[in-house]
Amino acid sequence: GLLDEGNLLNRYIRNTNITGVYEQVGGTCYAYAACSAYLNTIARIYGAKKPFPSFRECYDIACYNGENGGKSEESIRRLEKRFRYGVLWEQCDNLSIRDALTISVIISFKTSQKGWECVANGSLLEFPGGKPTGFHAAVVEGYDFDKDCVILKNSWGGETASPRFNFTGSAAHETKILRVFYT
């Protein structure tokens, strides 16, 4: 064959993720995730041919509700209304591996205190139990075929948490999937 057995990586992280979002303050993950998904979609479609807005310009629009939390889809709607690149979004029930690897996807989920500790340590793959406390929105950055889970980019990673974490929807108390794509 073209590739010898074992030459493919079992953990795949896209190289089209152009944003660093590890500086979240308060409940602004919705805006960070929206900006990343929006800019990544533009970069995949237009590449370097067309100048696109900075993360800061996008964030100023996307963070419509300040540190009080919000919806990534509303942030993307506002970004598209302002910049008009032809980016669309839709909520869906399931995430295919193909979508996880080829388009921008935001996963918003709710978990318990123990779940947040798991996220900080790099993995939310088993239901942690406990009472759910708030939502978190994160961009899908890749897929781990060995663990059969997505890899999410964490907006509060870096110093206080792993900048990426493995995630499966069955481990969360509630999960929402938002596909962000170009027409």
Image (tube, helix red, strand yellow):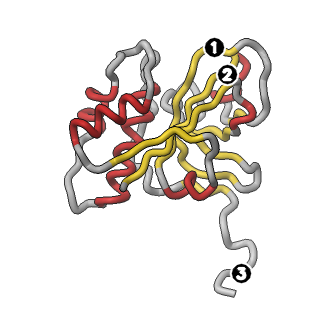
Q: Residue at x 69, y 87 (%)?
A: 1
Q: Secondary structure at mark 1?
A: strand
Q: Mark 3: which amino acid?
A: Asp
Image depth: mark 3 or mark 1 in front = 1
Q: In the figure, residue 175 lies in which quadrant? A: top right
Amino acid type indicated by mark 2: Thr
- Res 52 label: none
Q: Quadrant of residue 118?
A: top right
The residue indicated by pointer 1 is 133
Residue 42 left/right relative to 104: left
Q: Position of residue 25 (x, y in %)?
A: 42, 19
Identified at 70% across, 39% down, the residue is 168
Q: Which residue lies at the image location 43% right of the left edge and 30% below the top edge?
A: 72
**Earlier sequence position, callout 3 versus callout 2:** 3
> Which of pointers 3 and 1 lies earlier in the amino acid sequence?
3
Residue 4's disc number: 3
Looking at marks 2 and 1 on the same chain, the residue that comes earlier in the sequence is marked by 2
| x and y percentages locating residue 17 in the rendered image | 44, 50
How many angstroms separate mark 3 from mark 1 (CA)?
Answer: 47 Å
Q: Are marks 2 and 1 in contact (CB under 8 Å)?
A: yes
Residue under numbered circle 2? 111
Front in this rendered view, residue 59 or 86 = 86
Q: Eyeballing the image, is 10 above or below 109?
A: below
**Which residue occupies 29% across, 50% down?**
86
